[in-house]
Image: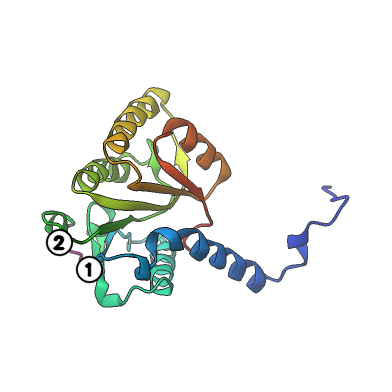
Amino acid sequence: TFVLSTPAPWLSLSRDQCSTGLARRLVQSLAPFLSRSKSTARRLLYVDPATHFNVGDNLIVEGTLRLIRALGWRDEEIAPCSIYQGAYGPPVLEECGAYTQFKDEGRDALAIWHGGGNWGDLYREPHDARMASLGTLLRMNYTVVGMPQSMRYQNRETAKKEAAYLNELVEASPGRLILCWRQKNSWQEARSLFPAVQHLLVPDAAF
């Protein structure tokens, strides 16, 4: 039996209080990077939202949309597009290449990457697609916020190779990649692997 000698504060919270607090923390953590009032971007690119048979991903999509609306973005300013998971709709999304072929003159370019639990080599296809698109977006001067993820590498050589690739990308585009992690161990490992990147420990977007 597990017994707390001193009751933890969260034990007295109701489910609604707990979820509201997590949602508030998510908004506060990402407001400096995604607030509409602080951006001159014409649109917010939402890269690869997963609206397929995985109910968890669907909740993350809904949470992400509610989050960015709370940060001031109107629906007509949010541009969801497909890289890999977004191709499994509905809805059927336009491929992200249609948006990344240009950048408005004199404006910021801002993108968010769908969160979840597939950073690493456990689910290779969506992760490989993400890594390739990060290179494209950063080279086109986008600021990219990776929504909360969990990390798992089964092969340490893969982790080292991807760390070298990502750190090189970010060193050429300083300050323009922010990665969010929904678990402390993922956040700690990411800080070790990708020191050139800015990392945030925040709740899952589904909250």
Name the N-terminal-most of marks 2 and 1: 1
How many other residues sit within 10 Å of disc 1, few (<14), some (14-19) or many (≥20)? some
Residue 31 falls in which quadrant of the image?
bottom left
* Residue at 38 percent of width and 25 percent of height: 160
Coordinates of residue 126 in the picture (x, y in percent): 30, 46
Task: Residue 42: give its label.
Answer: 1
* Residue at 36 percent of width and 30 percent of height: 163
Q: Against 10, is 179 above or below?
A: above
Residue type marked 2: Asp
Q: Against 39, is 147 above or below?
A: above
Q: Are marks 2 and 1 in contact (CB under 8 Å)?
A: yes
Q: Is 145 in front, or is 175? A: 175
Helix, strand or loop for disc 1:
loop
Q: Against 202, is 40 above or below?
A: below
Residue type marked 1: Arg
Asked whether the viewer can see residue 56, the reply is no
Is residue 178 toward the left or the right of residue 85 in the image? right
Q: Is 15 in front, or is 108? A: 108
Which residue is the extreme one toward the right?
Answer: 5
Helix, strand or loop for disc 2:
loop
Q: Is 116 in front, or is 160? A: 160
For the magenta stretch, what is the residue range? Answer: 90-95
* Residue at 52 percent of width and 54 percent of height: 202
Q: CA distance from mark 2 to mark 1?
A: 8 Å
Q: Which residue is mark 2?
A: 104
Coordinates of residue 116 in the picture (x, y in percent): 42, 52
How many other residues sit within 10 Å of disc 2, few (<14), some (14-19) or many (≥20)? few
